[in-house]
Image: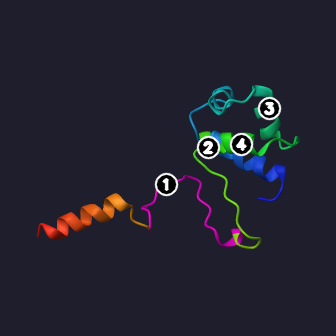
């Protein structure tokens, strides 16, 4: 996404797939309804923190990638949790304990 209009379209589409209203989204994101209307219209500029708050409440996060890298990302209409590729210290300790008790 490279324009405010494209971002607004994305946000409106995601909002349609949720069970919350614009009013609820604005309240949960901590922004005024007028600000949310401006964000969803794609006609007004807004703070990055506003975008981050709206994305967060819709189940997304803002990620910055090098130019050209975005085309390699797979778009998903429904975000799903994935298994982390890197194990936590706790996971490693549990695995060690399990191995030691065998």
Q: Residue 23 carries which label?
A: none
Q: Exactly how many numbered labels are in the figure?
A: 4
Measure the alpha-carbon separation of dots 4 and 3. Answer: 14 Å
Measure the alpha-carbon separation of dots 3 and 2. Answer: 16 Å
Q: In this view, does 20 lie to the left or right of 35?
A: left
Q: Residues within 10 Å of mark 4 (few under 14, many from 20)?
A: some
- Name the quadrant of the N terminus: bottom right
Q: Which mark is residue 80?
A: 1
Q: Label 2 near label 3: C-beta < 8 Å?
A: no
Dot placed on the residue nearer the N-terminal end, 2 or 1: 2
| Residue at 23% over, 67% down | 96
Judging from the image, what secondary structure is the residue with disc 1 in?
loop
Measured from the top left, where is residue 18 in percent x and y? Answer: 58, 39
Question: For the residues carrying marks 2 and 4, which lies nearer the camera in this image?
Answer: 2
- Pick out the residue farthest to the left: 102
To which quarter of the image does residue 42 belong?
top right
Dot placed on the residue nearer the N-terminal end, 2 or 4: 4
To which quarter of the image does residue 41 belong?
top right
Judging from the image, what secondary structure is the residue with disc 3 in?
helix
Residue 6 highlighted magenta (yes or no): no
Dot placed on the residue nearer the N-terminal end, 3 or 2: 3
Dot placed on the residue nearer the N-terminal end, 3 or 1: 3
Q: In this view, does 38 lie to the left or right of 21?
A: right
Q: Residue 35 carries which label?
A: 3
Q: Label 3 near label 4: C-beta < 8 Å?
A: no
Could you say which is closer to the camera, residue 67 or residue 72? 67
Residue for badge 2: 56
């Amino acid at each position: 996404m490279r324009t405010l209009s494209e971002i607004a379209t994305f946000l409106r589409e995601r909002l349609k797939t949720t069970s919350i209203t614009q009013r609820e989204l604005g309240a949960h994101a901590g922004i005024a309804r007028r600000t949310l209307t401006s964000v969803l219209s794609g006609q007004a500029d807004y703070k990055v923190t506003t975008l981050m708050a709206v994305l967060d409440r819709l189940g997304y996060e803002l990620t910055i990638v090098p130019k050209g890298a975005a085309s390699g990302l797979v778009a998903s209409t429904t975000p799903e949790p994935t298994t982390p590729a890197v194990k936590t210290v706790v996971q490693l300790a549990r695995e060690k304990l399990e191995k030691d008790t065998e």
